[in-house]
């Protein structure tokens, strides 16, 4: 009789092992997805800040040129350095 019980226990152990592996795989996949999402958010946020800073710098440059603080040559050189067309 013990042989039958051992066989059932072995079957349950195999099923639990498969379930455990599946859960471990899902946890690893979820962790990788979270890391990738956080990386993407960090990169896109940094790009947005750079774009905003460039626009702010261009507005300041235009204001300085309008007030006569800088010459047209200085304005054009600074505008090219900022990457603005």
Image (spheres, rainbow, N blue to C red):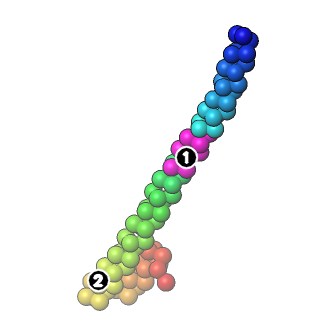
Q: Residue at x 35, y 75 (%)?
A: 57
Q: Nearer the viewer, residue 28 or 4?
A: 4
Evaluate whether residue 82 shows in this view: yes
Q: Is residue 29 magenta?
A: yes
The residue that mark 2 highlights is: 64
Q: Residue at x 69, y 16 (%)?
A: 5
Does residue 46 appear left or right of residue 2 in this picture? left
Q: Which mark is residue 30?
A: 1
The secondary structure type at the circle numbered 2 is: helix
Q: On the image, which quarter does residue 71 sit in?
A: bottom left
Is residue 6 depicted above or below 63 in this figure?
Answer: above
Q: Which residues are magenta?
A: 25-34
- Where in the figure is residue 68, as x and y percent of width and height? 27, 88
Does residue 32 appear left or right of residue 64 in this picture? right
- Mark 2 to mark 1: distance in Å? 51 Å
Is residue 48 depicted above or below 2 in this figure?
Answer: below
Q: Earlier in the sequence, mark 2 or mark 1?
A: 1
Mark 2 crowdedness (10 Å alpha carbons): few <14, some 14-19, many ≥20: some
Q: Nearer the viewer, residue 15 or 28?
A: 15
The secondary structure type at the circle numbered 1 is: helix
């Amino acid at each position: 009789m013990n042989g039958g019980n051992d066989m059932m226990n072995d079957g349950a152990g195999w099923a639990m092992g498969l379930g455990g592996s599946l859960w471990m795989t899902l946890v690893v996949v979820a962790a990788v997805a979270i890391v990738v999402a956080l990386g993407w958010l960090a990169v896109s946020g940094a790009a947005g800040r750079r774009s905003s800073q460039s626009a702010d710098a261009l507005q300041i440059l235009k204001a300085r040129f309008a007030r006569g603080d800088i010459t047209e040559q200085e304005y054009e050189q600074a505008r090219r350095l900022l990457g603005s067309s």
